[in-house]
Image (tube, rainbow, N blue to C red):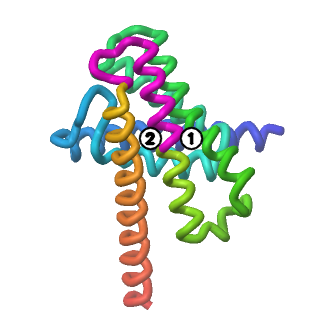
Amino acid sequence: MTNNISEWSKSFLISAASYGALFYANDWLTSTLVYGLGVNWIYLPAGLRLFLTLVFALPGALGIAVASMLICWLGDFPQDLVTCIGIGLVSGFAPYIARIFVLANLPISADLSDLSLPKLLMCILIYAFLSSGMHQWWFAIRGLDNTGSLNHFFVMFIGDVLGTILLIAVIKYGLDLLKKTRTIAL
């Protein structure tokens, strides 16, 4: 039992810390690509949300939710607790709901060993659609200025898809470099 709690806590902390760090890195790297409040043309953390929820499931979703709520509270959003909690919940649980949908409808093994490119592309599109839709729905309900529109949905969707693809490409490139340096060192 203690080991399960330890694994759960570790997954939660890894998710919260990595999501927060990548959010601020993305904010710095893509500051000129901001379309509106909470909407960016390239959003690298979208890719991390996909993998954290696929790999860690509920602890990953909760880590993302807590980090996102704190980012919202400390950032540009109105410091309204209900708005920030909602944004956190949408950020963590839209990908978790996408995970449930994906695993129920696509033949993907629990260890992701059979995650092919077509399956990965379907995951990316489903995750981006649910996240963008739920975020814009929440923004509209909370009456945030110039958000919650169809334009914001499309830009967020595109930003999530591009950010996920770019993050995957960077990780793959890094792993290929690592493999190449290990081969040269041997």
Secondary structure at badge 1 equals helix
Is 137 covered by the magenta stretch?
yes
Amino acid type at image mark 1:
Pro
Type of amino acid under label 2: Tyr
Please tell me which residue is depicted at 50% across the width and 17% down the height of the picture: 85
- The nearer-to-camera label among 2 and 1 is 1
Q: Is residue 152 left or right of residue 164?
A: left
Which quadrant is the C terminus positioned in?
bottom left
**Relative to 1, 60 lies left or right:** left
Tell whether label 1 touches label 2 (CB within 8 Å): no
* N-term mark: 2 or 1: 2
Q: Is residue 162 above or below residue 64?
A: below
Q: Nearer the viewer, residue 164 or 52?
A: 164
Instruction: Please identify the quarter of the rendering in which residue 5 is found.
Output: top right
Residue extending furthest toward the left: 32
Please, which residue is most extreme toward the right here? Answer: 1
Rendered location of residue 75, percent (x, y): 30, 22
Q: Residue at x 59, y 70 (%)?
A: 116
Q: Say which of 90 and 140 sits in front.
A: 140
Q: Distance between the Cα atoms at labels 2 and 1?
A: 13 Å
* Mark 2, other Cα within 10 Å: few <14 / some 14–19 / many ≥20: many
Give the number of the disc on residue 19: 2
Q: Position of residue 78 (x, y in %)?
A: 33, 12
* Residue underneath mark 1: 95
Q: Quadrant of the N terminus?
A: top right
Query: Range of the magenta residues?
Result: 129-148
**Does 55 lie within the magenta span?**
no
Task: Please provide percent x and percent y for residue 131.
Answer: 49, 37
Residue at x 79% of width, y 38% of height:
2
Say what secondary structure mark 2 lies in.
helix
Q: Residue at x 49, y 43 (%)?
A: 129
